[in-house]
Structures are given as structure tokens and as C-alpha cells.
Image (spheres, helix red, strand yellow):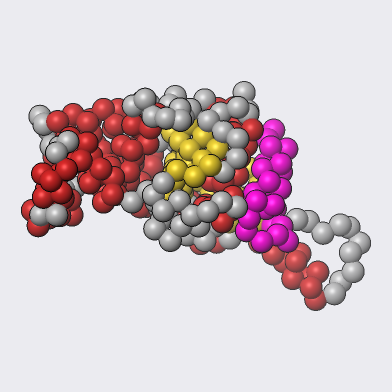
């Protein structure tokens, strides 16, 4: 079974990595690949700046669900809006729900409860998958915060379950924590660049996920690789710089491989702007890069 076959069997996949390494683009690429396999995929973005729509050529989400092609949709999600939506669901009288969400005590609780915002975001994904959501979704891919913040997000439901033990909120958090701990249903994909700082953060995140959560990533993708120059290429300054960058890429990937024996795929640097053409080209290349 290939690594993409394994990822296709998951229900929730969290994509993370150091800022600026192509995490959002990789989220779009995975979504496109898995939708092409017949999966109904929802891409959840948690950055309020909204950039996922640019990669897929759609209008901004603004909190709603936007179709991005057959079997593929995107949604930008903010925790405060999710939590307020849960209040309106549990308190069906609009006036009372509004009084609660506008109260100072409510906002203090939202800001102070450990892991509540992170749990709300992941809980939304869980509800989409298991709550009779329409249209039906087979797989949710989360374009998660960078590196350690993603580890904090994944740990949040367990922390909230302990803090709110015995109550309805604690029970919901406990169910979500058990779901996230099931490696057959949930996975993590790391994006990186084959450069010193991104590789170092990737190694630290691998160790953090293992020590804190017992999670082993399904896949690491090295973005923006400089392709090798053909033998005998002229020795002009531009090509010399290209060769130097390629040697750096290879050295850093060797450093990663010395500590990581799992799936590692490479995607090349392409002369394309962010958008559907780049996503489609990288999706094709990633599919071919599988062993």
C-alpha cells in the first residue's frame, strides 16, 4: 500500500510545518489528489488571512463552505465563531443565545478554558465527519498552525477533557481525544523545505509529536527542491548557484533521513505562481513520486 493509499483511508489529516514552507499549497495538493480518487474532501483552514482559496482558484470562504471542484471543498474556520455556533445550537432561543455569547463571563471562559479554542476547531472536523453533515464528507484535511502550535492543537482535547471531567464539555473533549489517538482514522503530514532551519524544526516536531502524543507522521514532503542540473551544463554563475542550492538540499535531506525512516517525498521548485496550475502540477508530480 502506498503512502497516499494510507492517507486516503484516514478520516482526518492534519498538515503542518514551519511557516513559509508551502503547508497551505501541500494541503491543496493532497485535497486535489484524494478528491480525484473519489473521496469527498473538505479542506479546513484556520488562518484568518485566508490563502487556501488562492491555491485552488475559488472565492474566499469567509466562514462558509466553498466548492473547489468535484468532491473538493474548502472552509475557513475561526474558533470563536465555532464556539458561538455551538451555543446557538444548544440554546435554541435566539435571544438567550445572544445574551450568553455577548456576556463578559462567556468571553472570559472562552479565553481562559485550557484548549477550548483548539478543541472547537478539531471538534468541528469531527462533527462534519460524524454528525450527519451535508454534503457528506469522507475526509477532512486541516491546514493547521505552524509546527509546535499544531502539537498544542492535537493535545488540546485531552487537556480539556481532564479540566472539564464529568461534564458534557469534558465528555465531548474525551471522545475527540480518543478519535485523534486512533492512527487508523487520524494522521499527520509534515511540510518542510530542504534547508537548515525548516529541517531542524521538522526533526524537533517529529520528536515532540512522539513524546507528547505518541503520534508518528504518515508522511513528510520536502517542497521547493532544486532539480539537479544535467551533466555538462555550462559553468556560469547562475548554474553554479543552482548546483550549490541543490547540494544544500541533498545535505539537509540526508540529515533528515538519518533520524527519520518513514515516508519522505520530494516536490520540485516550479516556475509557477500560486494557483490551480501550480496545485495541479504538484499533484501530478507527487503522485508520480510515490515508490
Image quadrant in which the N terminus is located: top right
Above or below: residue 81 compared with residue 219: below
The answer to whether residue 170 is left or right of residue 249 is left
Q: Nearer the viewer, residue 166 or 32?
A: 32
The answer to whether residue 14 is left or right of residue 4 is left
Q: Nearer the viewer, residue 195 or 169?
A: 169
Image quadrant in which the C terminus is located: top right
The answer to whether residue 284 is left or right of residue 117 is right
Q: Position of residue 127 (x, y in %)?
A: 33, 31
Q: Position of residue 193 (x, y in %)?
A: 58, 56
Q: Tell me if I can see residue 9 in this picture.
A: yes
Q: Nearer the viewer, residue 216 or 94?
A: 94
Q: Position of residue 19 (x, y in %)?
A: 47, 59
Specify whether residue 287 is painted magenta.
Answer: yes
Q: Tell me if I can see residue 255 in this picture.
A: no
Residue at point 10%, 29% (across, down): 166
Residue at point 86%, 71% (across, down): 235
Residue at point 60%, 27% (across, down): 38
Q: Quadrant of residue 210?
A: top left
Looking at this rendering, what residue extends furthest in the bottom direction? 237
Number of on-image labels: 0
Specify whether residue 265 is painted magenta.
Answer: no
Which span is picked out in magenta? 268-291
Above or below: residue 176 compared with residue 283: above
Residue at point 10%, 54% (across, down): 103
Q: Position of residue 29 (x, y in %)?
A: 60, 44
Amino acid at each position: 500500500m502506498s503512502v497516499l493509499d494510507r492517507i486516503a483511508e484516514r478520516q482526518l489529516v492534519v498538515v503542518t510545518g514551519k511557516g513559509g514552507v508551502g503547508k497551505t499549497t501541500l494541503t491543496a495538493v493532497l485535497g486535489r489528489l484524494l478528491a480525484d480518487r473519489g473521496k469527498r474532501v473538505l479542506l479546513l483552514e484556520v488562518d484568518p488571512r485566508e490563502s487556501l482559496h488562492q491555491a485552488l482558484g475559488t472565492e474566499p470562504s469567509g466562514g462558509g463552505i466553498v466548492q473547489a471542484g468535484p468532491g473538493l471543498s474548502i472552509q475557513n474556520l475561526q474558533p470563536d465563531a465555532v464556539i458561538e455556533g455551538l451555543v446557538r445550537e444548544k440554546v435554541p432561543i435566539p435571544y438567550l443565545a445572544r445574551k450568553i455569547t455577548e456576556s463578559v463571563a462567556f468571553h472570559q471562559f472562552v479565553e481562559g478554558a485550557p484548549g477550548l479554542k483548539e478543541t472547537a476547531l478539531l471538534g468541528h472536523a469531527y462533527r462534519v465527519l460524524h454528525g450527519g453533515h451535508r454534503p457528506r464528507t469522507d475526509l477532512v484535511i486541516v491546514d493547521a498552525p505552524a509546527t509546535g502550535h499544531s502539537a498544542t492543537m492535537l493535545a488540546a482535547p485531552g487537556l480539556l477533557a481532564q479540566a472539564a471531567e464529568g461534564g458534557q464539555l469534558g465528555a465531548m473533549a474525551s471522545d475527540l481525544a480518543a478519535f485523534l489517538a486512533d492512527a487508523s482514522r487520524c494522521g499527520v503530514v509534515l511540510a518542510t523545505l530542504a534547508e537548515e532551519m525548516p529541517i531542524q524544526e521538522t526533526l524537533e516536531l517529529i520528536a515532540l509529536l512522539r513524546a507528547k502524543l505518541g503520534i508518528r507522521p504518515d508522511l513528510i514532503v520536502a517542497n521547493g527542491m532544486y532539480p539537479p542540473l544535467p551533466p555538462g551544463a555550462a559553468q556560469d554563475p547562475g548554474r553554479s548557484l543552482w548546483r550549490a542550492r541543490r547540494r544544500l538540499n541533498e545535505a539537509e535531506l540526508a540529515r533528515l533521513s538519518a533520524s527519520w525512516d518513514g515516508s519522505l517525498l520530494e516536490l520540485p521548485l516550479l516556475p509557477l505562481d500560486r494557483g490551480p496550475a501550480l496545485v495541479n502540477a504538484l499533484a501530478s508530480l507527487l503522485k508520480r513520486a510515490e515508490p
